[in-house]
C-alpha cells in the first residue's frame, strides 16, 4: 500500500511546477507539502492516510527532480545566453500570398533580427519592434491572428552535441516555467534555443537560466 501512496504523491507533484521547484531547490517543507497533498491523496485512495506515510513519499519524490543528469549537464554547462529586447511578434493566416510577402520581408531585412515559425495554419513572425508598423501594414487586417509588442527573446547557444542528446532543451524550458513565466513563443535553430517572453519577465527568466548554467558548471 505504501507503494500506492508513493505513486499517488509522485503523480500529484508531477502536475505542480511550484512543488517541483520547491523540491528541486530544497526550500520546500516536506511536512507542509504532505499536509497540502493529504486531502487529494485520501480522495484518490478512498481512505485515511497517515501524515508520516505522506512525508516519506514526498521525500522519495524529491530524487526525481534533479534538473540535470549525465550528458545534459555538460551541454547546459557549455551554453551561453544572449538577450534581445524590444521585440514584437505577428501571427498571420498561412496563405500562398502571405508566404510570398514573408519571403519578401526576409529579403528586405537580411541583417535584422527576424525569426519565422511556420505551423499548419498560421505563421508567426518575431522581429525587431522598430519594424512593427511596417510589417503589420504588409498583411490584410483580417489575416492577422495576433500581434504583440514589448517582448524580449532569450537566445541560448549550446554546444553542437545538443542536437544528439535528448532532454537539454526541456531543462531550459522547465527552468523558465517553474518561475511561472509565460513563454510566448519558442523555437530551435541548430544549437540555438530561442524563448520569446514579455519584457517584464526577462530578468526573472535570465536569472533562472543563469543559475541553471552556473549549477551545471560546478
Image: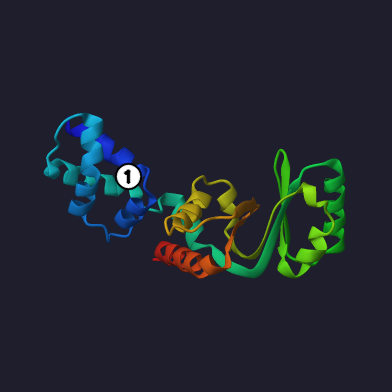
- Residue 33's place in the image compared with 198, above or below, is above
Count of numbered circles on the image: 1
Q: Residues within 10 Å of mark 1 (few under 14, many from 20)?
A: many
- Residue 150's place in the image compared with 177, above or below, is below
- Residue 134's place in the image compared with 163, above or below, is below
Q: Which residue is at the front of the view, 31 or 172?
A: 31
Q: Which residue is at the front of the view, 167 or 98?
A: 98
Can residue 110 be seen here? The reply is no
Q: Which residue is at the front of the view, 218 or 178?
A: 178
Can residue 36 be seen here? The reply is yes
Quadrant for the C terminus, please.
bottom left
Q: Residue at x 21, y 32 (%)?
A: 3
Residue 109 x, y percent position in the rendering: 83, 64
- Residue 67's place in the image compared with 109, above or below, is above
Q: Secondary structure at mark 1?
A: helix
Quadrant for the N terminus, please.
top left
Q: Residue at x 60, y 68 (%)?
A: 82
> Which quarter of the figure has residue 119?
top right
| Residue at the disc numbered 1 | 13
Residue 57 x, y percent position in the rendering: 21, 42
Position of 217 with respect to 160 (left or right) is left
Position of 194 with respect to 201 (left or right) is right
Q: Residue at x 63, y 52 (%)?
A: 187
Amino acid at each position: 500500500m505504501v507503494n500506492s501512496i508513493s505513486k499517488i504523491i509522485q503523480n500529484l507533484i508531477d502536475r505542480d511546477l511550484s512543488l517541483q521547484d520547491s523540491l528541486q531547490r530544497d526550500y520546500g517543507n516536506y511536512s507542509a507539502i504532505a499536509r497540502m497533498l493529504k486531502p487529494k491523496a485520501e480522495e484518490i485512495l478512498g481512505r485515511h492516510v497517515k501524515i508520516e506515510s505522506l512525508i516519506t513519499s514526498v521525500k522519495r519524490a524529491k530524487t526525481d527532480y534533479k534538473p540535470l543528469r549525465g550528458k545534459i549537464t555538460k551541454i547546459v554547462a557549455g551554453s551561453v545566453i544572449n538577450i534581445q529586447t524590444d521585440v514584437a511578434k505577428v501571427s498571420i493566416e498561412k496563405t500562398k500570398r502571405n508566404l510570398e510577402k514573408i519571403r519578401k520581408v526576409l529579403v528586405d531585412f537580411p541583417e535584422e533580427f527576424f525569426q519565422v515559425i511556420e505551423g499548419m495554419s498560421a505563421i508567426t513572425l518575431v522581429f525587431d519592434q522598430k519594424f512593427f508598423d511596417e510589417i503589420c501594414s504588409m498583411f490584410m487586417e483580417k489575416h492577422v491572428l495576433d500581434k504583440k509588442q514589448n517582448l524580449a527573446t532569450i537566445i541560448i547557444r549550446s554546444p553542437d552535441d545538443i542536437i544528439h542528446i535528448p532532454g537539454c532543451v526541456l531543462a531550459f524550458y522547465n527552468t523558465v516555467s517553474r518561475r511561472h513565466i509565460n513563454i510566448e513563443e519558442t523555437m530551435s535553430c541548430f544549437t540555438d534555443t530561442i524563448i520569446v517572453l514579455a519584457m517584464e519577465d526577462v530578468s526573472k527568466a535570465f536569472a533562472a537560466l543563469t543559475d541553471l548554467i552556473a549549477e551545471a558548471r560546478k
